Image (cartoon, rainbow, N blue to C red):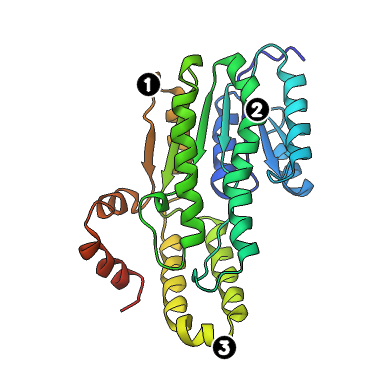
């Protein structure tokens, strides 16, 4: 097809930040390819933005689906290339590091790190054609790690490293790579986090519950409440649009409730920061 519009791919667009980002870009005239894992989510999105949004069934951990998605997009954009890639797909796990099953730990990296790189590799030839931009949706957890969020925070630190390396490596082609670091954002993921944490607690051994149960319940309850009071996902979408449209975007953008506060706190020395984190997350 000889489509003259700008094109964007947004991963993890079914709900929350991904959906808000896909909607914002569609409203600004982009033809948006939005990845989902369920066909009904794709139907809902395309129905909301008819003619502006094309859903793609894609699990970022399935190389065949990623490859098929890249081929479909390439056939559509022809010689225009891809103007924007927004890597948003991700999952979150809360466990004490002493107890977390290694298969769950590996799954965090498979989705949040390996999957982001797989999508980036698959779509970079199209990005290079358009001299487009890559937007990574990270987390304030790449600066400040809460207790029991070690598995998730580890992937966000890794994503920061990938983003920094990509930003430098793609400079010769004038491809901008930007990291968005949301703080507390009110999404469906907050409720899922609490449900998953409750299920995780049931998987603790009796010894594990004796060691961590009280502190884990206190932390996950406070963590979930903070997300319920968080910013609307649209604030993240607005910053993504800003990073795309700015002629000279920043390397990193903090956005959402508590993001700047946590970034400031992260600069404190551990002897000050550790007691503060213990107090905030109910560990003392």
Position in image of residue 149 (x %, y %): 46, 63
Give the Cα separation between the discs numbered 1 and 2. 22 Å
Q: Closer to the observer: label 1 or label 3?
A: 3
Q: Is residue 82 visible?
A: no
- Quadrant placement of the C terminus: bottom left
The image's mark for residue 248 is 1
Query: Total label count?
Result: 3
Considering depth in this image, is 57 or 6 the residue closer to the camera?
A: 57
Considering depth in this image, is 21 or 268 the residue closer to the camera?
A: 268
Badge 2 marks a residue whose secondary structure is helix
- Quadrant placement of the N terminus: top right
Q: Which residue is pictured at 47% across the width and 35% down the height? A: 163
The image's mark for residue 91 is none
The residue pinned by badge 2 equals 123
Q: Is residue 143 visible?
A: yes
Q: Are marks 2 and 3 in contact (CB under 8 Å)?
A: no
The residue pinned by badge 3 equals 206
Q: Which residue is pictured at 59% across the width and 70% down the height? A: 195
Position in image of residue 258 (x %, y %): 33, 54
Badge 3 marks a residue whose secondary structure is helix
Give the Cα separation between the discs numbered 2 and 3. 47 Å
Position in image of residue 197 (x %, y %): 55, 71
């Amino acid at each position: 097809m000889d489509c003259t519009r700008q094109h964007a791919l947004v991963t993890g667009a079914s709900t929350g930040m991904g959906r808000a980002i896909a909607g914002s870009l569609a409203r600004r005239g982009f033809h948006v390819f939005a990845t989902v894992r369920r066909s009904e989510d794709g139907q809902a999105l395309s129905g909301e933005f008819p003619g502006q949004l094309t859903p793609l069934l894609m699990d970022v951990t399935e190389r065949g689906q990623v490859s098929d998605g890249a081929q479909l997009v390439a056939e559509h954009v022809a010689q225009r290339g891809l103007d924007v890639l927004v890597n948003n797909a991700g999952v979150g796990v809360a466990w004490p590091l002493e107890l977390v099953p290694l298969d769950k730990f590996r799954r965090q990296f498979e989705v949040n790190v390996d999957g982001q790189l797989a999508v980036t590799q698959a779509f970079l030839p199209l990005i290079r054609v358009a001299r487009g931009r890559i937007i990574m949706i990270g987390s304030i957890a790449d600066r400040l790690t809460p207790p029991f969020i070690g598995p998730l925070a580890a992937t966000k630190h890794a994503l920061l490293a990938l983003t920094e390396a990509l930003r430098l490596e793609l400079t010769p082609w004038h491809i901008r790579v930007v990291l968005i670091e949301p703080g507390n954002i009110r999404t469906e993921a907050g409720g899922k986090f609490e449900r998953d944490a409750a299920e995780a607690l049931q998987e603790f051994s009796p010894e594990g519950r004796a060691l961590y149960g009280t502190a884990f319940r206190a932390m996950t309850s406070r963590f979930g409440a903070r997300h319920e009071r968080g910013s609307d996902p649209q604030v993240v979408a607005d910053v993504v649009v800003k990073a795309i449209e700015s002629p000279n975007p920043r390397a990193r953008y903090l956005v959402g409730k508590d993001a700047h506060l946590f970034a400031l706190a992260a600069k404190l020395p551990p002897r000050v920061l550790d007691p503060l984190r213990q107090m905030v997350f109910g560990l003392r």
